[in-house]
Amino acid sequence: MKQQTNRIKQYLIIAIILIAMPSCNNDTQIKEFKNQIEALNVTLKSKDSTILSLKEQLGNGPDTRRAPKNIIQSDFAKEIYHLYDEREELINEVVGQDGDDKPFKATRSLFYDFNDLQQYIRYVKIKSRKARVKPSGFRFYFALYPDDYVRDGKNKKYAQRQTFFIAPTVRKKVDGKLVDLGYTLDNKFNVELLKDIIGFDSIRGKDGKLYQRAGFFNVNLSNLLEEENSLIANEVTGTPPMGEEQ
């Protein structure tokens, strides 16, 4: 409301100047009036541009007053959550013991701090802008910590536990279809697709272990160094072992 009032005042000033101009016989005064009008017009255009920019940043997204399309009802959440119970029992039986040699209890939820998530999204935006790539979304990849995994140098309870990592996606056309592919950045801000780095097609070696096909062919020397611009996020808190379900 205040901005609108100030704008009205500026328009009134311009109108007064235009009314006063015919009564002026001095060319210098007329020129001064014209300069004032031009300055006010520039100010108005600048404000309009600023407002438009803010609207583009804030207003082009979905209407946050309405529930998103992916909101589900609690009864359906309960149904699909407990459909996993049988699989949890199977996982517990197969794994047997956790890193502390206690009965294994499969992960049923993962916690991500709200501020950490916001910081991660900002980080992705800043790094991606520098790489001149526009993120289309985020992809969550299911994963498993290795048998000897230790967190913070002491916590062994995460060994063999299910987790996930997050990566931003870029929209590309593959075989005539638009797909959202996970990506990260190398040390020179070049885009690297996760499908080329990780290799989602795996083969089993003679030793019985699984190896990624891409690992044999897609070797980027920059990946052998510390990745300064990695956009892949993990290290979330598993529940359990950090506590009962909340």
Image (cartoon, rainbow, N blue to C red):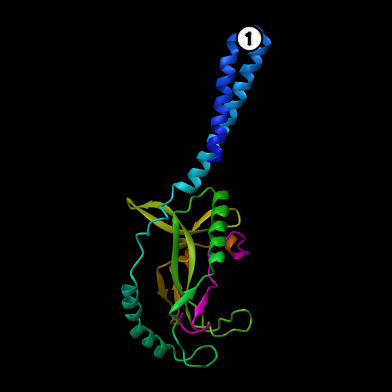
Q: Is residue 233 magenta?
A: yes
Q: Is residue 107 left or right of residue 3?
A: left
Q: Is residue 201 magenta?
A: no
Q: Residue at x 56, y 17 (%)?
A: 18
Position in image of residue 236 (x %, y %): 53, 73
Look at label 1 and name its amino acid. Cys
Position in image of residue 40 (x %, y %): 60, 26
Task: Name the quadrant containing residue 181.
Answer: bottom left
Residue at which label 1 appears: 24
Above or below: residue 187 compared with residue 81: above
Position in image of residue 91 (x %, y %): 40, 85
Instruction: Report the magenta residues as a range.
Output: 224-246
Above or below: residue 228 compared with residue 211: above
Above or below: residue 17 compared with residue 46: above
Above or below: residue 49 compared with residue 20: below
Q: Residues within 10 Å of mark 1 (few under 14, many from 20)?
A: few
Q: Residue at x 55, y 32 (%)?
A: 7
Q: Is residue 21 left or right of residue 138?
A: right
Q: Nearer the viewer, residue 207 or 121?
A: 121
Using the rendered image of the protein, determine whether residue 19 is visible from the camera's viewpoint. yes
Position in image of residue 16 (x %, y %): 58, 20
Task: Name the quadrant containing residue 119.
Answer: bottom right
